[in-house]
Amino acid sequence: MIDFTRYIGQTAGGAMNRLLDDSHSKHLGIKMDTPFTRFLILLMAAAALVAVYRLGWGLRASTHMNDYWPWGLWISFDVLGGVAMAAGAFLIAGAVYILNWKKYQCIARASILNAFFGYLLAAISITLDVGRSFVIWHPLIMWQVNSVMFIVALHLVLYLSTLATESSPMVFEKLGWQRALHIVGRGMIGAVMFGVALSLLHQSSLGANYLIVPGKLSPLWYSKLLPYLFLVSSIMMGLSMVSFETILTGKVFNHKTPLDVLEGLSRGVVLVGSLYCAMKIGLLAAGPGFGALIDGGFLGVMWLLEMAVGVVIPVALLAKRSNRRNLDTIFVASILVILGVLLNRLDVGIFAISDYANRTGADYFPSAMELILTSGMIAFAILGFKVCAKYLNLFPETDH
Amino acid sequence: MIRVRRSAMSISRRQFLKGVAGSGLVLAAGVSSTEARMSKKLPPEAVGLLYDATLCIGCKSCMVNCKIYNSVPGGALYKEGVASGVTDSLRCSKTEQTEKMASPPYETDGIEGNEGVWDAAEDLSGKTLSIIKAYRNGSGERKDTPVNGHAFFKQQCLHCITPACVSVCPAGAFVKDPHNGVVYYEAYRCIGCRYCQIACPFNIPRYEWDSVWPEVRKCQLCHHRFKEGKYSACAEFCPTGATIFGKVVELREEAKRRFNLKPGSRYDYPIRTLGAKEVNTRTVAPYADRIYGLNEAGGTQNLMLSGISFDLLGFSKKIPDSALPDLTWAYIAKIPWVFLAVFVGGTGIHAITGRLDKNRKEKGGGHD
């Protein structure tokens, strides 16, 4: 390993050395130089080029969005999806620090870090999506309290800071900054509560963004309960994301997977998934009616697909008690929930306005550059997580 | 050791509660300020346009003059250039521009040999704020008849009384003038999120997709000409009185009067402005449908009359009759309560579960 004290002085170099010490994660067996890592870096490099091109040549040059389809893949997938993926953090943090369910302590750090990357992904994507990226901070000084988007912007900034605070002990531990660690430790409960409040609001406000378009969104998705639907489905997604990630890291990094934790998470998915399913079916019956699924053509199929993949099959899979102790079943069910909720966000963000926009002759399919940027963002989240797993004490339970 | 830490914790918790109460108050105060919850009343001096499609002959004089008179400083199509646009945005203030644009932003796409001379706008866009379109059915012989007829219709911003674009803009780049009700756009505030485009039920705001420092474009009722005693260019240059400018209250009366006229009778249609001496006397055509803009999205300041139903002309059928910003406000108003509930409830639950946890593992000691 390189000794940084020789290049950047004793203090900074010492801190650098401590940060880059990976001896504690030796047992996880994380290798950095693998073909997969190289592939991720390649994706990120391509995405970086797209980002530069987008900033230099504008949105028409890089995306297929148009006046009838002003929000595309970046908003629907990276922002709506990325944020939903991050819901695990506030649930686990709330369970551990507020409800004192210490059982979940072992996955708290990983889920908070995962949320940090989810939000970072959303933040970077929205920065590139807005036309005037360099003044994206405007809402922070030009308050407009009637706007849900203003609320979203404020929450994004506050919550990123909260997640950074919640993750900071990992870094301070590594650096050996006892004083900082102590200060953060004292404020942790407050930070977690702040994070829970912000998350409840942020998850729901992404749905609330669409409350203003009753005439544009297909009635299969538009509902006055959109904020609550977004919130409940994000909880389902967050729990599954944590399960997925715990099992995956267990497999890849060879650390022990805590089965009772996964069982608890799965029980949560069944409960919340059933609630979500009841809400969706109730709203369908009360609103456009079941006939709309058949009349809706393509949109009806999308609705059914989203519900089958994301809700009905996984809940049915996990409903049986013995299945909730089977790693493979939990893994499959988690992936299904994640895909289903992502599909729901794509439906709301892109497909649900297709009837309205197509009527005017407009059409939208993401451009190659939009797809490259999104894949680069995903690669960034995966690699970022991997780097943190290697250099930070992400799984404290397995450490000693 | 443990006791000290716990007492430190409880102090921080108490301080936190205080902080919560404080921030809750601040939030509540902020929300109840004048900006919050948009007015649903017509502004006192509200002005607007009345477009009567039965008078329109499709000459597009309104479109041409809209571009010409909005390409000057203060006009809705005025573009000061990227550099000054960026500096204005970074300084968060507007510089006074004095120079005119070299030429109005004509749309020349796809026409061979056209060197910027022929304006070929097909739809509203970042370069076109107002457009005349044609309806045609079958042989197209008879004007203002749905079957085998033709008609013209106009699309432009309707200047909602409670505009969705104003309510959704996160940086307040859309403003409704509290006095005359014009909905205008302040480019230096805009971040380019395009939520206005999503939110507008009439799909009016258009984006400069080609630009690296894009702006949103829409009709601003030529409000830059008001202080010179002038009014909207489309009304001033309409030869038949199809578009007239006036106070909304009076325009509504005029629209209702026309709507109740007997088809085939004669009527003196004022030209350019309501109450003008110059009139276009002609036979009344039958009006279909309704007065567009009386109820749509809670009412608009521009009104439209047509001989053919607006549904047939392609106007969206799904626009509710109530003010759209109410839908999101119902959500936003709950936010302070969520903070309060989480902090008060969370502190309580934390205290209780913490004690239970401690009792459970008496021997273990230590909090975390």
Image (tube, helix red, strand yellow):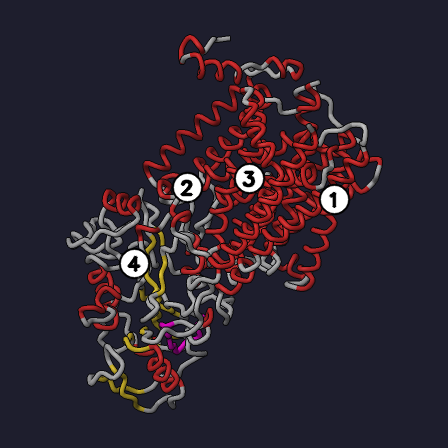
Give the alpha-carbon distance from disc 4 to disc 3, as whole Å: 36 Å
Q: Are marks 1 and 3 on the same chain?
A: no
Tell us which disc is closer to us: 4 or 3.
Answer: 3
Residue A87 visible here: no
Q: Which residues are magenta?
A: B301-312
Q: CA distance from mark 1 to mark 2?
A: 53 Å
- Gap between marks 1 and 4, in whole Å? 63 Å
Residues at marks 4 and 2, CA–CA distance in whole angstroms: 22 Å
Based on the picture, tell me whether residue A154 belongs to the magenta stretch: no
Say which label, 1 or 4, has the lower sequence index: 4
Dot 4: within a 10 Å radius of its alpha carbon, few (fewer than 14), some, or many (20 or more) residues?
Answer: many
Kindly report which numbered mark, 2 or 3, lies closer to the viewer in this rendering: 3
Which residue is at 35% across, 89% downward? B264
Q: Helix or strand or loop: what does disc 3 sit on? A: helix
Q: Distance between the Cα atoms at labels 2 and 3? A: 19 Å
Give me the chain letter of mark 2. Answer: A
Residue A399 locus on image (x, y percent): 68, 19
Judged by its main secondary structure, the magenta piece is loop
> For mark 4, what is the residue?
B128
Which labelled disc corresponds to residue A82?
3
Of the pair B239 and A264, the residue shown nearer to us: A264
Q: Quadrant of residue B240?
A: bottom left
Are discs 4 and 2 less than 8 Å apart at CB?
Answer: no
Q: Which mark is residue B352?
A: 1
Give the number of the mark in front: 1 or 3: 1
Q: Can you say which quadrant of the picture contains the C terminus of chain B?
A: top right
Amino acid at the residue labelled 1: Ile
Density class for disc 1 (Cα within 10 Å; few <14, some 14-19, many ≥20) is some
Name the chain letter of the residue that bears numbered label 3: A
